[in-house]
Image: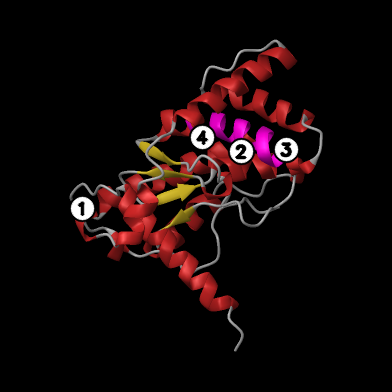
Amino acid sequence: MSTPILPPPGGPTLRHSGSFREAPTTCRAILGRMTETSHVEDLAGACVQAVHNALKLELDFTQDTLPILDHYARMATGPREEILGLVAPMLGAYFGEVVRRSLGPARWHAPAEEPPEWRLEFETFFLHLNPVGVAVEAILQRDVEGWGANLTVLDRDRKAVNDAVELYGDVDEDDYYRFAVRFEVLEQVVRTLETRALERGEKPVHFGPEVYAAAALDAEAARSKDEKPN
């Protein structure tokens, strides 16, 4: 199977990189409910405890622990509502913290009652994903729409990112949804975006939360337009 990477073309452009003062009122409303992330830390801590209880192994928020997380994810059973409502957010919070601490700077957009809307947003280039979506797919072992598991980058970076990921090669079906594989792909993407910024000789750019909020609004508007009958 091909390595999971990007959603369909038509992603964000650089026009969102203005200041927060220029962000529309709706963006500010979105930002107002994303600044508190203690629940993410609590869920990640709960994941550490759950894995210890089940496997007697310690998670320490490093990349090396992701195969343990993969093993635990494949043990997950129960009603779909329980998996999507508790297990996936718990595993996704841990995975996202590993990514944030290893590959950041990045921040969480994590409205407490809306895990499908969570994002891990990188600050020095435009890149985001939903770690809970990655967890949903890792548990269910299939693509799941509406959870943002794919990576979103600027349109101008899509080809370079795809080219870099193609060097990684195809992935066995059994490994396709593993946290460890997703991390390796993400690491390759981060290095590619860092290199492209250096090659362009750009001044440092900070992609703040208002940029991602505006891009999310645009994406929602585009989806609504596509869904309207002709």
Q: Where in the figure is residue 2, as x and y percent of width and height? A: 66, 54
Is 28 above or below relative to 76?
A: below
Q: Is residue 105 left or right of residue 167?
A: left
> What residue would you read off at disc 2?
181
Reading the chain from its start, which is encountered first: label 1 or label 2?
A: 2
* Separation of marks 4 and 1 at Cα, in angstroms: 28 Å
> What residue would you read off at disc 3?
83
User: Is residue 175 visible from the viewing direction of this image?
Assistant: no
User: Helix, strand or loop at disc 4?
Assistant: helix
* Separation of marks 4 and 3 at Cα, in angstroms: 17 Å
* Separation of marks 1 and 2 at Cα, in angstroms: 30 Å
Instruction: Say if mark 4 contacts mark 3, CB within 8 Å.
Output: no
Reading the chain from its start, which is encountered first: label 3 or label 1?
A: 3
Instruction: Say if mark 3 contacts mark 2, CB within 8 Å.
Output: no
> What residue would you read off at disc 1?
202
Q: Where in the figure is residue 110, as x and y percent of width and height? A: 47, 41
The extreme left residue here reads: 203
> What residue would you read off at disc 4?
96
Instruction: Say if mark 2 contacts mark 4, CB within 8 Å.
Output: no
